[in-house]
Each structure stands twice: as structure tokens, then as C-alpha cells.
Amino acid sequence: MPSDALATSARPFAPRRSLIAQNPSVLWFLLALALFTLGVTVLAEMGLVSTSMVKTLGKTLCLCLVAVAMDVVWGYCGILSLGHMAFFGIGGYAIGMWLMYARTEIIVTTSLAAAPIPPTPEEIVDAVGTQIFGVVGSSEFPWLWAFADSLALQLLMVVLVPGLLALVFGWLAFRSRVTGVYLSILTQAMTLALSLWLFQNDTGLRGNNGLSGLQNIPGYDHVPQSTVSLVFFWASAAALAAGYLLFAWVVSGKFGSVIRGIRDNEARVRFLGYHVEHYKLFVFTLTAVVAGIAGALYYPQAGIINPAEIAPIASIYLAVWVAIGGRGRLYGAAIGAAFVSLLSSWFTGGGAPDIDLGFYRIQWTDWWLVLLGLSFVAVTLLAPKGIGGLFDLIPGRRTPDRQGDYGPDDGAWRREEGTE
Amino acid sequence: MTALLEVSGVSVTFDGFRAINNLSIQIGEPELRAVIGPNGAGKTTFMDIVTGKTRPDEGRVLWGERSVSLLRMSESQIARAGIGRKFQKPTVFEDQTVRENLAMALRNPRGPLAVLFHRKTPEGAARIESIAEEIGLLPALPRKAGELSHGQKQWLEIGMLLAQDPRLLLVDEPAAGMTPAEREHTTELLKRIARSRAVVVVEHDMEFVRRLDCKVTVLHEGSVLAEGTLDHVTRNQQVIDVYLGR
């Protein structure tokens, strides 16, 4: 090997280029997130941002996190999962069970403390059961609630249940080599089945009533909601930062190279000796776990969770956010989720003024979905890179590592050949 | 020379069409072998069977000293066992750089966790650079594979095969779409590789096969019609009738 060729054309070997050095966008994202978090906190302390607004923003950060996970599974690995909001919902249910149980237990204990005879533990549990399940005409605790009295175990469930469901579902689906639109349909079926199951009263999760009062943190009743909302806002920001770093690391190195290869040409990756199904399963399960964590932070801020949250449409929205934000880049997914979900609550919350056409009055509460659908189609057709693609317009950003020219090879003298 | 790959009595039928009919081929190590035949002779199906993409209806495919059956292994297991494949159409990962393409193919542990915690090593980088040098793509290492010319993509794919460090290379029409100079380079490269490994080249172009100067197997209607030197098989009357004649 001629050594001068190496010296001139190959870059020096750099074994430990840090994650940040390889992906400057990670640093920019974390910086923007930190500034946003500080800004909102300061404005909230000054009373310029309402408590409900802080909650909305905190919830939005959780949606950003699940969107980033969706981007990894879809934008990087090419699995169009239309069921990731099911994992998000499961995370919410898991934490909701503890919140509801613990708070009801406190209320019941306080009210029974005034009774002449002190209540036995069984009586307290029975009273809690009656309080929680009265709405569905029951007072028995179903098996699902076996660990509801323990925060630690329910937190474990936040991670374990979505992870195990994704593992089993993914193993069955990927092993049979179900891909493309068939896999998407299968994930829709999964989330629909889960939602229908939860709608039933005898499932044991209060049917269509769902779990409510989740904004009240047991034992912290004396803390005002303005403070609770800020704490959850900070927790959501920290989770988004951690999740973003995790996924940036996952997709940056050789692993990212392999999963992008799977997205672009699955068969070729197989012939290189990689067990494609293991990779898909790993990505699917990891993103499901993160979705569960995002859900566990979201629903205490929303205050209520019911089976409609797990309806198939929710997961389709998630895909729309990622598509509009720009898939294949993590910050694109986060921007898409924040932009579209905030816009959505502005339009559907009556923030947007109605447009009077004389013969018809466009009310955005009805027409927002049409607008969203149209913009989804427009983005897909006209700007497949989504909002994130705007960052490519910054000069020199698109190909920071490029060496050599784009042009034809030295051997191909097309212009000269053409004139002969 | 012992047989590295032994295909015997293999048949496969697609919807009533017998693509491979009682095919038997032995490949030694090292060996350079050209497989020729008219369209539909079963050349690509033969590769599909060896690499695990297609399961034959009957027959045996044995591999290596211990005569392991390849029929029960998945595509990725077969690839890890040491069989590399280059496709007819260049299939490189166009969205990734030449370096990333080669790094992915480089012989290393293939499990998800091993890859996730993989760290670049100076040995790996040196290996990538020496392969890039061999296929003439050293200056193109940081470029996206999608920007390469057709011939360069073909080479990149051959380079990815080399990086896999296989014992047997199955190469489908390596010279398609190459300029005469590129073809010459490819011939030299294949001959050099075949000094230490088994290489099976499927090719249409007789001139290219002549330059490879190796044993030739002629396939017709899914089975072996003739085998021997190019001159030997081109004198065979049956071969002339089905393939070369008219």
C-alpha cells in the first residue's frame, strides 16, 4: 500500500470522536431545550405563564419524547409502527393506578379516622375499592391492581409492561417477516384491541371512565398545583433530554448504520450476516419502553386517562407529527410533535378565529382535522424532509464531513464526448 | 483441493416451473469458477439457494470441512458461516458513506448489543482503508455511496464482500455496466481474490469469462450441461446448440 496516498487522502484515525462532535445538532437541541425550560420557569414564577399553560408545555415535551422514539423506529429503522401510543397509554395507566390508589387511600383513611372504632386494614382496602370502582358497579380489586399500592412496583410496570408487550408482539411479527403496510395494520390492530379491552368495565381499569384525578400527587396536597406543574415540567424536560441523548447515541454509530441499512434494504443487511429480526426487535422494544416513560409523565399532567387515548387514531397522529417534523432526524420529530400538537390545541381550543365566508362559516374546531390532513399530504408531496429540512438551508450544514467534489469522475468526459 | 461447497441433486420448482433440476456442483478452495448459461438457466436461483434466500424442494447443500447443511440455516447465519454475495444490480447503502458501507460489512460480531457498544479500532480503520485502496475508492471514503458511478458502486460492493472476509464469494455479473478499463481492473481483482478463496462468478459476457481464464460451468434449464475450460465447453455441441450457436 503506498503510504503517501493514505497520508493525503485519508483522514487521521479518530477512535473517540464524541457524540457531540459527530452530531452538533444534539448540543443545539439540548441547549434550546434548557433555554426553553428556564424561560418557562422564570415566566411562570413571574406569573406571566399560567399553570395550565405550564401543564400544556410539559405535556408537549412528553409528546416530543414519544415522537423522537417514533422517529427511531420509523425514520431510522423503517418500521412504520402505528401502535406506539398504546405503549404511551400503558405507561400512563401504570402510574395512574398508583396515583389513584394512594390518593384514595389517604382520603378514606382521613374520613374513617373520625369513626369511633378505628378501621381495620381490610376495611380501608374495601372502602378504597368502593371509591375507585363504584362508577363501574364494583368494589373488588381486580388482579391488575395487585401492585397498585406500591409506587416502586408501579414505576417498574411503566417500563416492564410496554417492554414485554413490544417484545412479544415484535417477536411474533418480525419472526414471520411481516413488513411494510402489513406490519402497520398489525400494530393498529394491537392498539385497537388494547383500547377495546380497556373500554370493558370488567377489565378492571374503570372502563370508559378511565383513571382520573391524576394531577393530585398523594401526600403533596398542600403543594399548590402551580408548583406541581413546574416539577412535572422539569421532569418532562429532563426525560426528553435523556431520551434524546440515548437515541442520538443509538443512531449515531455502527448500530445506526445497520438500522438505516435495514430501512433501505433489509435483504442486503441479512446477506451481510446481520440478524435483522433481532435488530428490529431491539429497536421496537427500546422505543416502546421510552414511550411508556413518556406516557407516565404525560398523564399526571393531563389529570385523566381513558381508553380513547389508546385509540388507533392517536398512533396515526404520532406518525403525522414525525412526518411533518421530518423523519430521519431526531430534532425534526421533536419539532414536529411540538409544533403540530400546540397548533392543534390552539385550533381545537377555540384560539383560532372562525372565518366567515358569507355562505358558510369555517369553524376550526371542525375543520382543523381537514387542515392537518391537507398539510400532511402537502408535506409528504412537496417537502418530504419536513420542517427539519429547513435546517439544511443553513449553508455548510448539510454535509459537514464532505471531502472531494460532487462532479463526474475524471474518467467520464461527458462534455467532450458529446461534442465529438 | 477439497470441496468447500457441495451442491448435489438439488431441485426447486416455482409455480410448476422447474428452475433448478437435479443440479450438482462442487466448488473447491481456493478456486475461481465461472458459471454461464442463457437467461432462465437458473444461475441466480443457484445463488439464492446457496445463500438461503430460496429453499430447494430436494437435494443437499453441504458446506465446509464438517459438511454442515446450509438448508437449515438462515440467510444471516449462512453469511456469518463465510459465504458472501454480490448482487447483479449494485446494492450498496446509498444514503451512507463509502466508509460506513465498508464498516458495516467488516468482519466483527454481528449481534445488536455488540454492535451498539462497538468502538472503532485502528485495525478496523486500517482494514477499511486497505480495502478501499484495493477497489480504488480511497479518496471516496467520506462520500455518500449514492454519488458514486455505476462501476464504482460495483466495486464498492466487491469491497464489502472482501470486508466480510468470506471463504466463498458468489459474484453475480460483476462487470455489468463497466467501461473496458474498469472490466480489466475487475478481472484482475477477482483473480487475485481467488488465489486464497473460492470465487464463483456468474457472467453473460464471454469475453470477460475468457479473461478470467478458469473452469467454466454451463447451466441450462436448471442443470449442468457441460463443465471444463472455456475452450472445452465452447466446443461442446450441446452448448453450441443451446447457448452459443445460431
Image: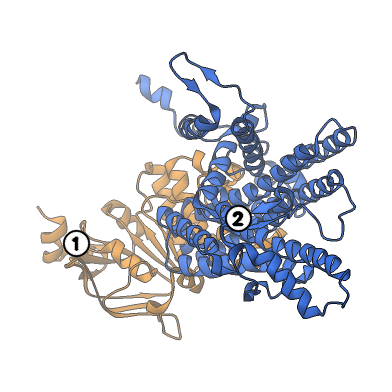
Chain colours: A blue, B orange
Q: Amino acid at mark 1?
A: Thr
Give the image location of residue A272, x and y in percent. Answer: 50, 62
| Disc 1 crowd, CA 10 A, few/some/many (<14, 14-19, 20+) | some
Q: Nearer the viewer, residue A107 or A231?
A: A107
Q: Amino acid at mark 2?
A: Asn
Whether residue A113 sits left or right of residue A244 in the image: it is right
Tell me which residue sits at (28%, 63%) in the image.
Answer: B43
Chain at numbered mark 2: A
Q: Residue furthest top?
A: A358
Q: Nearer the viewer, residue B77 or A234?
A: A234
Residue carrying label 1: B234
Q: Residue furthest front?
A: A116
Tell me which residue sits at (77%, 64%) in the image.
Answer: A104
Q: Let me know if residue A282 appears in the view.
A: no
Give the SS element for disc 1: helix
In this picture, is B244 found above or below A395?
A: below
